[in-house]
Amino acid sequence: EADIYQTPRYLVIGTGKKITLECSQTMGHDKMYWYQQDPGMELHLIHYSYGVNSTEKGDLSSESTVSRIRTEHFPLTLESARPSHTSQYLCASGNRGTAFFGQGTRLTVV
Amino acid sequence: RKEVEQDPGPFNVPEGATVAFNCTYSNSASQSFFWYRQDCRKEPKLLMSVYSSGNEDGRFTAQLNRASQYISLLIRDSKLSDSATYLCVVNIEYGGSQGNLIFGKGTKLSVKP
């Protein structure tokens, strides 16, 4: 089993709140990713990182931001949550072209 | 044109059937290839890598055709537990960069008793 963890697993929060989704991996992978996925739909890459102090935006425009201060940690922050942010957020890490995913955070903004 | 294209399905097959999925990719810089499996409301998990020479893992066989830029996955003697969405994934590397994983939309398989 891959050692990548996301918290919280489920989050219901009010509009306008600031939230941070946590993602940690203990495999020492340099590459980490954040994907957004609605039920039954495709994965959309929203952020990725090649290593410490490296962050890039993905294919899908997102109002979220990320940071990579430590290799093992890649948190995603929404400064002001909106109902349109309701989705599942999946974190992954990997190397040599493979990716191991966390169990995801299901976010609902009411 | 999407970088990775798959037939979304669903493929509805009886138990024991053989089913094949194809996937095409547009970027010739693609260097490594994979099939992932995603169960309903779960995270994707690596099923197998795909090599030019073709590779087999039990009932699963993956093939890569670089000239035609497509990848295939064959499942023999399908089981109920094979029901899932199968994601085609390519890793594209540019120069010395580490590249990026590009996921297809996935092909949904439903195996019926």
Image (spheres, coloured by chain):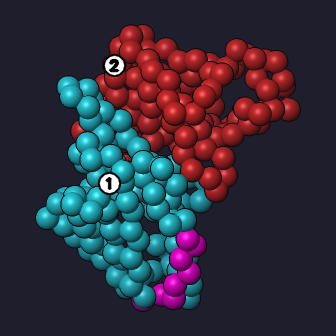
Chain colours: A red, B cyan
Front position in the image: A109 or B69: B69
Q: Which quadrant of the view contains residue B95?
A: top left
Residue at horizontal 84 percent and vertical 25 percent from the top = A14
Mark 2 lies on residue: A51
Q: Which quadrant of the view contains residue B93?
A: top left
Is residue A16 in view from this perspective? yes
Residue at horizontal 77 percent and vertical 34 percent from the top = A84
Front position in the image: A16 or B93: B93
Is residue B56 positioned above or below A5 on the image? below
Residue at horizontal 49 percent and vertical 14 percent from the top = A67
Mark 1 lies on residue: B34
Residue A60 in picture, x, y percent from top left = 57, 33
As helix, strand or loop, the secondary structure at mark 2 comes to: loop
Task: Give the number of marks.
Answer: 2
Q: Which residues are magenta?
A: B9-16
Residue B96 in picture, x, y percent from top left = 20, 26
As helix, strand or loop, the secondary structure at mark 1 comes to: strand
What is the crowding at mark 1: few (fewer than 14 residues within 10 Å), some, or many (at least 20)? many
Is B57 displayed left or right of A104 in the figure? left
